[in-house]
Amino acid sequence: MAKEKPDLVYGTLDMLILKALQHDPRHGLGIADRIQQMSKDILHVEQGSLYPALYRLEAQSWIKAKWGVSDNNRKARYYELTTAGRKQLTAEEEHWLRITKGIDLVLAGG
Amino acid sequence: MPRLRAWFSRLAGLFQKDKRDAEMAEEMRAHVDLLIERNIAAGMLPHEARNAALRQFGGVERVKEIAREQRVWRWADEFLQDLRFGARMLFRSPGFSILAILCLTLGIGTNAAVFSWIEGILIRPYPLVAHQDRMFALGGTTRGATEGHGLSYPDFVDLEKNSMLFESFIVDRIVGTSLSVGDRAERASGGIVSANYFDALGVQPILGRGFRPEEGTGRNAHPVTVISYLTWQDRYKGDPEIIGKTQFFNGVQHTIIGVAPEKFHGTFIGYSFNFWVPTSMQETFDSTGYKLEDRGARWIESYAFLKPGVTRQQAQAELSAIAQRLENDFPETNRGQGFELFPLWKTPFNAVGNLSPTLAITTGVAFFVLLIACANVSNLLLARSLLRRHEMTMRLALGAGRRRLIKQLFTEGLLLSVIAAAGGIMVAYWCRNALVLVSPSRTPGITIDYPGQLDWRVLALSVAVCIGSTMLFALIPAIHASHVDLSGALKSEGSGVVGGSGRSRLRSVLVFVQVALSFVLIAGTGLLLRSLVQMQNSDPGFSTRNVVVSGADLFSAGYKPDRAKIFYEQMLERIRALPGVQSAALARVRPFSYAVYSSAPLEIEGYQPPRNEQVAADYNQVGEGYFSAIGIPIVEGREFTRNDDENAPPVAIVNETMAAKYWPEKNAIGQRLKVKDKWMEIVGVAKNANYRTKLENPMPFFYVPVRQDFFVQNGFIIRTEQSAAAIMNALAREIHALDPNLAPLDTISLQQQVDLMSYTQRLAAALLAIFGGMALFLASIGLYAVMSYSVSQGTRELGVRMALGAEAKDLLRLVISRGLRLTTAGIVIGAAAALLLTRLMGNLLYKVSPRDPIAFGAALIILIAVALVACFLPARRATRIDPARALRT
């Protein structure tokens, strides 16, 4: 198992990647940038765990990859969500909301 | 579906590994390039930008490694890796690998061979026959009797008509005939079969056709025959125009209407049939008369096919109900008569009954051999895991998981046993017909057939054995190897007191198991060999030396009784005139032959049988001079003479058992008994003898003069100093002189005839001797390995002892006594197990107790001797230890 940095909650990287790919296909660096940008610089994706996660998701058939050309004319591998990936994202979002809501309640009750 | 696709993509990843690796590298390079560009844009110098980018990304190789683990199907990847590594390890120590593979090949091979025999003889004995899982043997029973018998034809037809749960019934009665081959007569075996035979079996003749329904009935009305492929090839040279040609069988011209497929040998275990004729021809092939309309004549051996889904119990219930109805309708013939279904492996009327206990024991023995082989390989692996402890420790220290290590060792074990299984299946393939080789040679022309079957079931079982044995032999060493105490192992590295006592104790247990198992096998072999010797030496009640038996197949040659009488008269004169012949006599049935004695219900004057008892006995028709020729003493009264012919009052000679049973306290001479409505006077009492096998219990038996109860088919009993081979040509000449178309049948000594009947015991003894020998060999390897190991482990201790003044002979004694302690413990347990297990051999043993002290003693001595040798070599090495070096290590 890839070890994830403590600034990411364990097991959430997959969901974040799926979310980052929700609207457009992106390459690896683009995904990392997108997560950083969406989280307003709170979350930094460790490059070392990004690729293992990408390959894991690809093996699950939640994302698929093809070679493309980046904005500055470099060859890059672009990832996009598959239908199964979209479903998975929805499921994970719901699951996450439930969990955080639960945690919020617990913390608020203290 | 996505799951399945994921699986495929992983699988694809596995095989396109190099391509995927390259792609991955390129992708990461692209990523780093992008980072560099970004850094340059942010104002760094190119080499700074590059270094920073690499730092940001982390170690490329490490990421790749982690990613790889994610990406491919990890388990399989590791498995392949382990496999490659395991193969390298096997190549690195070829001695170990060859020995281990050899042991396992023996173990797996014997099992596969035995499975193939069981499959081919007991479970699915009949190649090409469809639905053998629904096929059952069908026999007749008599209430209160233990022995079964056949079915009568009218009963058979009623079964066919009245049953609902059966798909079909078939008749299959083995018959023999003689075919002339030049100036020799050659026996041929065939079957009298119902007309539906080939259709019911689903066997399609490759030329011509099977029988038509109307060909089954009508007394001698349909002289047609289907011949076997082998007969077609051998006798007719594969003539493509064979259909429609004719062949004389028993003096009747038969038209050949079909040729059976090559693999079809009939439905009789033990013989490969040469031809088949329909039931309508029964009288032509049966020297005891026409039986198709006789409900009392129970001669049919039969098989039944159940409808799909019907159980044997249901089918049996239906048969019993039909038997009940027949009993009511035909009380004279069917009182107390029933039908019984048997699974094929219990078929009462072929060689299966004799073979199945032998095969059962062989299965057990083969399993023992496998266990011993596994224990051996386990031992070898343990020894090697010690050598590899350094490697294991290193790997553990570098962070390999214990599970991974166990998996690695397992994979290596699996590799070994897969290679061994391939070898084992080859062994089984070579051995598939081995049973025929150890079976006695019999009559020329008759093909003995004990087919081993290597079908997918046998292969599947072998694979299971292979995996199972891997579990057995690899598990213990693997767990052991993975439980290296890291700090301890690293510290003690090279200090010489490695391995720990736990491991050597484990190895001792393995040897102990091997010795125990070997003891059981050797003791069992000893018992069977002793039985054989006992059987060889036991007196059958007649002389087996200087007696030759022979005959001529007059029935097949179409002789009628009058002509046969003249032939025998003249022939006996000629035989008696041969040089070296002391006497000669006729006997309808030769003792220990496959021919069947006459049997009839009896009425005994002055004897009132208890209710429910049917007085009956077997009897034989013998000529004058029979008793002196064969050497059965007449204890009272007289032997038959020439004068006891058809015109004289009927007489009989009874054996001692019969005399004692029906005329106790009285002289049997002069008493009368009634056989088939004929009163006979007893003129003599003969000493008891064995009639069929040496295993039989004493039974009432009597003799009648051949002249008063004549059949066309008789054998010659010849007392002569000459050997059977020497007299054979003279016999042939004399027979030719009387009838150029006749030839003598198998001329053999009476001893040979007797030996034929101990076939099962011989087979069992041969198999057990072979397997027991293998077991002994394997066990001694194991013992030797453990002893040398423990000596090498104890080097330091021995060195200390030597330094303190112990002499070579003390050390020798020390080491050998250790080995013997181990062996003795194994022997004690082995003996206990053998005492329990040999009882299961019951009916294969002859006049030998299952606890025979000689067999057990022999096993003890053999094992001790082997242990001594196995211990001596390492012990001698121990005495040559240089104490100074031993202490330094």
Image: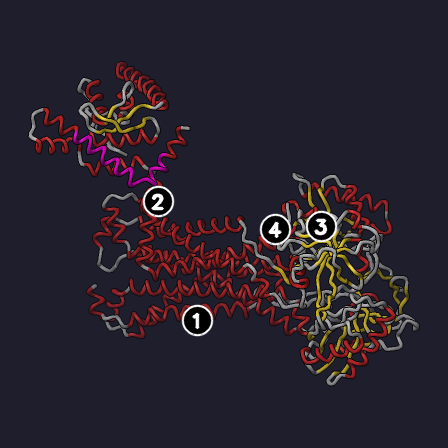
Q: What residue is shown at x 29% (from left), y 72% (from top)?
A: B879
The residue pinned by badge 4 equals: B124
Of mark 3 and mark 4, the one earlier in the sequence is 4
Residue under disc 3 on the same chain as residue under disc 4: yes
SS for tag 3?
loop
User: Which of the two labelled residues, at mark 4 and mark 2, occupies the earlier sequence position?
Assistant: 2
Residue type at tag 2:
Phe
Q: Residue furthest front?
A: B241
Nearer the observer, disc 3 or disc 1? 3
Report the side of B837 relative to B90 (left or right).
right
- SS assignment at label 4: loop
The answer to whether dots 1 and 2 both sit on one chain is: yes
3 or 1: tag closer to the N-terminus: 3
Q: Which numbered disc, 4 or 1, marks the residue closer to the eye?
A: 4
Label 1 crowd bin: few (<14), some (14–19), many (20+), radius 10 Å: some
Q: CA distance from mark 3 to mark 1?
A: 64 Å
On-image quarter of the N terminus of chain B: top left
Task: State whether the magenta stretch is mostly helix, strand or loop.
Answer: helix
Tag on residue B209? 3
Q: Are marks 4 and 2 on the same chain?
A: yes
The label on residue B865 is 1
- Do the CB atoms of the residues marked 3 and 1 lie less than 8 Å apart? no
Mark 4 burial class by Cα count in 10 Å: few <14, some 14-19, many 20+: many
Query: Which of disc 1 and disc 4 is earlier in sequence?
Result: 4
